Amino acid sequence: MITVRKTSFRLDTEHTTYLFRKTKYGHLEHIYYGNLLSKEDRAGTLAQKRSIQVGSSVFYDPEDSVYALDSMCLEWADNGRGDYRQSPTEFVMPDGSFVTDFIYESHDVLDGCVPMDTLPTAYGGNQTLKITLKDKAFPIFIDLYYTVFEQTDVITRRAVVRNEANAPLTIRRIMSMTMDLPDECFQMYTLDGGWIKEANLHKRPVTYGITVNSSTTGASSNRHNPAFIIAEADANEDYGDVYAFNMIYSGNHYSIAEKNERDDVRVSMGINPHLFEWIVSPGDKFETPECVMSYSSRGFNGTSHHMHDFINEHIVRGDYKKKDRPVLLNNWEAHFFDFNEGKLLRLAKDAKELGVELFVLDDGWFGDRNNDNAGLGDYTVNPKKLPQGIKVFADKIRKIGLNFGLWFEPEMVNEDSNLYRTHPEYAVKLPNRKAVLGRNQLVLDLCQKEVRDYIVEQVSNILDEADIRYVKWDMNRHIAEVFSSVLQNQGEFYHRYILGLYEVLTRIFVPRPHILLESCSSGGNRFDLGMLVFSPQIWASDDTDPIERLKIQTGLSYFYPQSTMGAHVSASPHQQTLRETPLATRFHAACFGCLGYELDLKYLTPEEKKDIADQITFYKQYRRIFQYGRFYRIRSYKENKVIWEVVSEEKETALTGFFQTLAAAAESSDKLKVIGLKKGRYMIRTRPQRLYIERFGCLTKHVMPVELSPDGMIMRVANRHYSLKDCVETYTCSAEALSSGIPLCEQFIGTGYHEKES
Ligand code: GLA
């Protein structure tokens, strides 16, 4: 609910209040963001007091020695009027100066969300507050939009700049939001990484000066995800003041936490000003991406729940909103580029027998794409691999009983491709320099209309021809040496690229809502809310090693729900780490997302096939909870444990993933703690794991009457057809007992085997 009083603006969600006011000079002063206030609470009481002048201040009004912008908590800020913190804007004003003074002009309370002309927004909000600021010297306006999403405890913010002066306005920096908070010994949490190690959570103190979280690669990036948290020093998963932020944008992003000598922390977020410059002509406007904010005093799980609900309810849209995601098999790690129709059909048949629902043909089906040097940009099917074309192949897959999905990388081109030979001007490169390549490819210039039309036409034709139900949309290199022949001002490139991408995705997928889009960028290089507007799920990482996945999926879980994370079971030893892990562990990490398999099934033993068939049956039984259940990160007091839990909507069923990342000798007992259930009595059942004979190696000689070679024929045959049960425990107890924790049986501590050991 939005309440406007004489000078104050109050935005309430179910459990939070956001409050700011207009000062006597018309600046917007941030007052409060926290738990829901009572109706009687007033801005004057909660505002920071200005009772005495702060030394070395520059005063906004020479007559007023307590009004210095630098020592105020603001909701928007200028350059050159005495505030020395980083301003959300850097404009070259019509007089050539950088000085601005945006003050309150008017406001309006509108129903629902206000869509943008150029960028995607969240939908289904309750109300929007629009505040218009006007510069004191020029008819240049900034409209600040605040949308309230009451049930999910989220408020979004964005800014629109309108130039009504008769000279152009140059924007060098424009943030979507800015807000100053009094410090609580804040810590900043970000998701950082790179290829195959995305979204690892890092914590650092917000100290004096500026802490930046940003990307410059042209995408939201695997280096630094746009989402971040500012939390009080003692916050943990279940307790403490936590502010979470994200942005509906897939390009270069930039966020700061700037702590000044007054111990106020400015948080700003927007498009990265790096290599950015935008000229707003007279009569024109510039829209910034929508930022998403949430507060909880219930720790990180609190803001995660808000963000998860917000994404499931207000970001993901179309036919796949809140819809079950299919169990898929992707052929990439099974074949790479080396496949033919026979290999694919065999894989598909095996997959069908195990319970898979969707077959995805990955890279390599088109042009001369037999390795990653050639073919990107072309869409003709490789006749050696699929002699009768894509439609006939898709029909064969459907005849097996599986849906059919296909991989594309439409934003890229190889120099060795028909597209590049015919249209070298479609690629991003400078006329006077040798191009730099990433994965042997160039980026297509989405600023050009012809390029966007080409992609839309080519991809759409294939989708319709083969009645494709799932698309994996990949993007496998960072953008460099930005230049577009159609732009006068190259400072617009990065943003125009993203606008072009959103246009292409809209044109292809909005008319085809039956297609499930999974976006990918070498894994999680573009895991962001902008992509989630179009693709309900995103391939979280090329790293399917479950121990690495625990870090990646845990990191993502702070901001993104399980329904958005593509998670696959692949072969062991792992392609990315060479680590060997049990099949059960691989499944148990992947089932807390959108489950898939990505390995050559022909190498599985009959025992492993039974194992996978059981996994898929189990997943289907609890799919709704795995994909949409309430997700908790359970605190563990041991460093070698990661514990995830999902709870059904009715709070009657919980599934816990109890993971051990490293074995320790004679490990002490573990406790299973389950939270979030309704009062009542519960039956606790472990999901028995299969323990394969090969894991015991030569240890079998200690329990067998005969000594068998661990690598001998008998052991290999036994391993194919027989496994031991592991981790078999059953209890009955109350929700209260569960929430304080049930001690589990000891695990393997060197003295022998017992099926109850976990
Ligand atoms: C990227 C993706 C992979 C796979 C390959 C194909 O690396 O992340 O999943 O699709 O491209 O080239």
Image: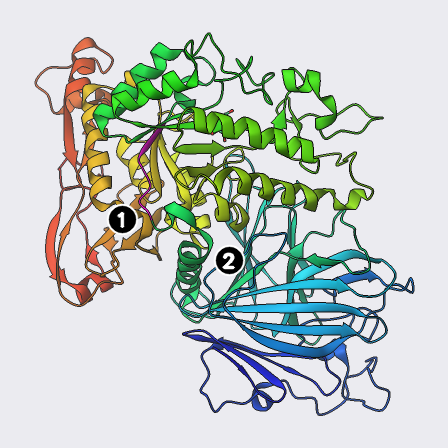
Residue 266 screen position, x and y as percent: 66, 68
| Magenta highlight range | 323-329
From the image, state whether disc 2 or disc 1 is nearer to you: 2
Left or right of 359 on screen, residue 87: right
Residue 583 screen position, x and y as percent: 28, 31
| Residue at left offset 10%, top offset 21% | 704
Amino acid type at mark 1: Arg
| Residue at left offset 58%, top offset 59% | 290
| Residue at left offset 35%, top offset 48% | 642
Report the residue marked by disc 1. Answer: 624
Q: Quadrant of residue 713?
A: top left
Amino acid type at mark 2: Ala
Q: Is residue 3 above or below residue 457?
A: below
Dot 2 or dot 1, earlier in sequence: 2
Residue 544 appears in the picture as rendered: no
Pointer 1: residues within 10 angstroms few (<14), some, or many (20+)? some
Pointer 2: residues within 10 angstroms few (<14), some, or many (20+)? many
Q: Please tell me whether residue 203 belongs to the stretch shown in magenta.
A: no
Report the residue marked by disc 2. Answer: 122
| Residue at left offset 10%, top offset 57% | 732
